[in-house]
Structures are given as structure tokens and as C-alpha cells.
Amino acid sequence: MVLAGISLGNYLGGKLADRFASRRMLGILFLVSGLAALSVLYTASALASYKGPSTLPLVLRIVALTAAIFFLPSCLLGTISPLLVKLTLRDLNRSGDIVGKIYAVSTAGSILGTFATGFFLVSFFGTRTIILGVSLLLFLLAIVFGDWTVRDRGGGRIVSLLLLLATGLGGYAIASRGALASNCLKETNYYCIKVYEETVQDHPVKVLVLDHLVHSYNSLEDPQHLVYGYEFMYAGLTEYAARRRPPGGLRTLFIGGGGYTFPRYIEARYPGSVIDVIEIDPEVTQTAVEYLGLDPMGGIRSINFDARLAIKEMLGDQMYDLVLGDAFHGYSVPYHLTTKEFNDRIKAHLAPGGIYMLNVSSQ
């Protein structure tokens, strides 16, 4: 949807550039784009709980919501480049050089923005603060490049002051009304993490939500308390594996930690077990320690790494009686954890008679 919006914006921006090529128009586009970017904070909050018509497939609902939030801002931002090219081209003999430089800078900015946002900015600032920062930057660019004083110095200065005032008041209004307040307990490079309390089956539990999916129900008082149906299937197969082994605990590997519900279950029910948990997001593990009853000094070893690489490089020759796959990205198992190569690596770490159990959502 973002690329579609940019494409339409490029087309419309070209039409605007041919008819209204001026720095004043450039400033207007920066200003309107800033307002559209600012609107994302409101539309995202308003549509956060809207799931759309249940008759529509999930993919179409996601596309529709993404379009409602991001299409217009992307389209308006896309109008800027053609106008910028038009204003920069003063000598047709150097048009190739100028356009090439503009596209080179644009592409370099896209690459830098992708990596900086994914690896640093989201975890340091959160998505809402980033969006506000982008909006304020666009307002500032509108003031600097709008050239509001060309025709009427007095009027232009007034417009500039009004823009500055609107920027400050807009930022204050957003902050004071809670638009910057994330509903995430923690926002990491991978998830929006939320934890809340609930009573399930007459038992108080802590609920872990990663993005919009409930991943676990944890009882702080009773680690052996299970809620999900698949956990009872896990428990039955674990009991079967334990009866086949000599006393002294099980050797278990978990792919995906989540709320560490079943690792805590095994730690409590089968003392002395080897319990290795591969969880890609260290903040998920830390959340389990802070809120979900995981004892960092207990018998559970956490490996915060991608499961495919961890199994290849970090487990050595350790063998396991049980390998439990419970890693999800949304409703699906990450693709690279479903390949034949990955399953061959799992098999290489299974003890004779070992069991590999995989949780797959039907959504």
C-alpha cells in the first residue's frame, strides 16, 4: 500500500510540477504531507480494534486497514519528488546528472531509513514518536523551502510564524491527548508486548500478548497450570517421553519462548530436566522474568537468537528427548523454521526415540 501510494503520488506530482512549479508549492506539499503523516497517529489508534467484516479473508482486511492508515500519507509524500526534480532542472544539458543524483540520494535514504528504523529507531523511540518526528521534520521543511516571503514579505513571515505555531500546538495537542502513548508495555524490534491480568477457569493468570495475538496464560502461583488445549497435548506426550527415560529429568528444547509457560511446567513437574529455550527477542524473555514468573536463576536456559542459526551454531552436540516448536510470526510459523534443512537439523539433535512436536495455527 505504501508503494502504491507513492506511485500514485509520483504521477500526480508530475502533473502538479508541470502546472505549479514553485517553491511555494513545494512548501505546501511538505506542509500537507506533514499533516497527513500526523494523521497516522489518530487513524491507527481509531482503527486498532477494528477487525473489518468477518466475511472478508484476513489478508484483505489487513490490506484494507493498511490502506486506510498509510495510503494517503504515502501518496502525498510521493508528490514531492517530481516537483523537486522540476525545480532543480535549470539546464537540460545536465538533466541526467541532476536526476541521477536525486534518485541516488532518495535510494540511499530509503536504505538508511529501512535499516535505521528496523534495528535502532523503533526500539529506542517507538513507532509513535518516530511518526511525530517525521511530521515535525516535514513542517520544518515546509518553513525552510516554502519560500513564503517571495511575493509578500509581511504576509510570508506571518504564514511562517503560523506554521511554527501550528507545529508546536499540534505536537502539544498530540502529546497531551495521549496520541503518543503506546498501548504496548514494550515496543521492540519484533513485537508490541502487552501483559495484563485475567481470570481464566476461575484461576488468576497473566496474559502475554505479542502484537495482536495472545501467546500465553501464566499462573504465577502454579507453574503447572495450563490453559491452551495444545499445552495439554504437549503435557501428555511429555509424560509419555518421561516414562521411557531413566529417572533424572528430561532433555528438552523449545523453539520460541513466548511466556515460558511450558518450560516452567517442565521445570516444576520434572526436576533436574535440561530446558533450553530459543527465543529471538530478548525483551520477550525479560518480560517473562519481570511479569510472568520466569526465574532467571532457575534451570531454564534462554538463548536469544534466531532458531535456525542457534540450532546450527550454539547447541554443540547436545541431544534432546523432546523438541517443542512454538514459534510464530502472527498466525504462521516463520517460513525458515519449516524447511527440510531446518527439520534435518532438529533431527540431528534428537536422541534415539526423541519426539519433535510442532504447534501450527489453523487460522
Image (cartoon, helix red, strand yellow):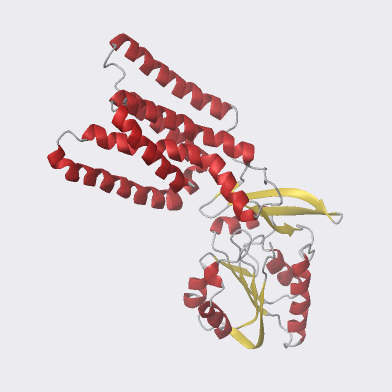
Numbered marks: total: 0
Residue 315 rendering spot, x and y as whole percentages:
52, 77
Residue 130 showing in the rendered view: yes
Q: Nearer the viewer, residue 355 or 8?
A: 8
Residue 30 rendering spot, x and y as whole percentages:
38, 30
Q: Residue furthest top?
A: 154
Q: From the viewer's perspective, tell me whether residue 97 is left or right of residue 249.
A: left
Screen quadrant of the C terminus:
bottom right
Q: Is residue 50 above or below residue 144?
A: below
Q: Residue at x 54, y 82 (%)?
A: 344
Residue 117 rendering spot, x and y as whole percentages:
43, 48
Q: From the viewer's perspective, tell me whether residue 260 is left or right of residue 16.
A: right
Q: Residue at x 53, y 55 (%)?
A: 190
Q: Nearer the viewer, residue 228 or 55?
A: 55
- For residue 356, which quarter of the picture? bottom right
- For residue 225, which quarter of the picture? bottom right
Q: From the viewer's perspective, tell me whether residue 229 is left or right of residue 1.
A: right
Residue 78 showing in the rendered view: no
- For residue 319, which quarter of the picture? bottom right
